[in-house]
Amino acid sequence: MTDKNMQYSTGGNVAGGDTAMRSCGGYIFGTRHREYMRRAYHSTVNIAEGAVRAGKTIDNVFVFAALLDASPDKFHLASGSTLGNAKLNIGDCNGLGLEHIFEGRCAWVKYRGNDALKVQTPVGERIVIFSGGKNSDSFKRIRGNSYGMWIATEINLHSDSFIKEAFNRQLAARDRRIFWDLNPSSPNHFIYRDYIDRFADTGEGSYYNYAHFTIRDNPVVSEERMREIISQYDKNSVWYRRDILGERCAAEGLIYRSFADDPRLFTIDDIPASDIDFVTVGVDFGGNRSKTTFVATAFLRGEAGSYRGVTVIGERAVAGGKGEIDSGRINGELSSFLGTIRKRWQGVYIKYVFADSEAQYLINGLRRSLARDPDNCAVTVVDSAKRPICDRIAFVVSLMSAGKFHLLKDCELLCDGLSCAVWDEKSEGDKRLDNFTSDIDILDAMEYSIERYMGKIN
């Protein structure tokens, strides 16, 4: 371990007081964080909940690492909503993660098909298995081992089956420890009902350690940076209350309230072709009572590798219920739609068609059809990323808040869809109400057209 990380090296530093926890590797821990970490060193279940950029994950990583150096168990578990999320937030953690803490005595390896961090400790080799936990079948990846400690980031985005399996895998642990962090969710979320609130019933002490943090508890975040982070949120949104205020709150009412209050703020008459870097088209396939929808989105030229915003420049809905629309009609409608976009914006580059990944036979039909079309044979048809709906909604709301989302006035279907979309108040998670009172299909198509570019719009 390098000199800059020496204060991470033993549990004694964590238990011993402020010196190690005030500053470690250049990172400053606030008073409430130090208090949480002291308790965590002696507690079985440790949960850090609260606002974004509050330092929750770093607290858990720090104590997990300190305990790993003396753990009697060989195998341990680190999880996120996805494997990439776990490796980024726990393994790297902005230069403060496990791979940096154990620099010089750890290595990324494959262990029985799983990504793992092998660490040399004073008590022998320790293996930390990394895994994603959001899918219902993710639990299959962590079977076969007994784990001593389990650290999870964004535990509210893990599936219940994964959580149950992880607990089962810890039954034989010699020193069982759990470290969870999360941003607040709906009060009805199963993570509270079945786990966190039930843990609280056991009482404080050596078993359960809970702390709630806001962004102001993190001394590393300057006032200027704090204002910048807050400015990215719509203060009327559920994400502002959760991510900034750190509140548990239900998603209710209008989803895109700022848009619904005044659509004119987000609509424009036209956009010059010279402003467009490229265009993508999102496709949501209909069925039963729903329509097949196309939405064309223009990405506006920005700095190298990024874009300064998006503008929806076209839409189309293909009416007809189940059995009334065949692959041939969809193929023809899409070719016609692409032709309309090309005619209106001469020379525009239509880069991708992102189609609903659940209908592979229709996607294959689109590929074959466009490949035979001389005007559209260069357009690439790929699966939609199909990110969680809540993530897609949050992304669009953040673009609106930053003034980076617009649509043409003649996109009336999308305008109505954004104005009328509401949360499903009966859901324990965050879901759009889908009872045909608003046009969910057009919203899905719009989101498919932009979701693969999250993080590239500046």
Image (cartoon, rainbow, N blue to C red):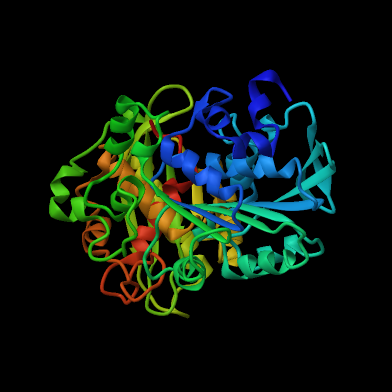
Residue 289 versus residue 195: which sits nearer the camera? 195
> Would residue 22 be found to the left or right of residue 147 on screen?
left
* Residue at the image position 31 percent from the left and 65 percent from the top: 250
* Residue at the image position 74 percent from the left and 60 percent from the top: 141
Q: Quadrant of residue 116?
A: top right
> Would residue 387 be found to the left or right of residue 400 on screen?
right
* Residue at the image position 27 percent from the left and 59 percent from the top: 255
Residue 267 versus residue 225: which sits nearer the camera? 225
* Residue at the image position 48 percent from the left and 26 percent from the top: 305
Q: Residue furthest top?
A: 3
Q: Looking at the image, is 210 positioned above or below residue 352?
A: below
Numbered-mark total: 0
Q: Quadrant of residue 94?
A: top right
> Would residue 256 be found to the left or right of residue 379 on screen?
left
> Would residue 381 be found to the left or right of residue 433 on screen?
right
Residue 65 versus residue 99: which sits nearer the camera? 65
Q: Looking at the image, is 364 positioned above or below residue 305?
A: below
Q: In the rendered view of the protein, which quadrant contains the C terminus? A: top left
Q: Position of residue 245 (x, y in %)?
A: 30, 48
Residue 273 in sight in this render = no
Q: Residue furthest front?
A: 16
Q: Position of residue 383 (x, y in %)?
A: 56, 54
Residue 90 in sight in this render = yes
Q: Position of residue 394 (x, y in %)?
A: 37, 51
Q: Looking at the image, is 155 positioned above or below residue 127?
A: below
Q: In the rendered view of the protein, which quadrant contains the N terminus? A: top right
Q: Position of residue 53 (x, y in %)?
A: 42, 39
Q: Looking at the image, is 137 positioned above or below residue 397?
A: below
Residue 270 versus residue 187: which sits nearer the camera? 187
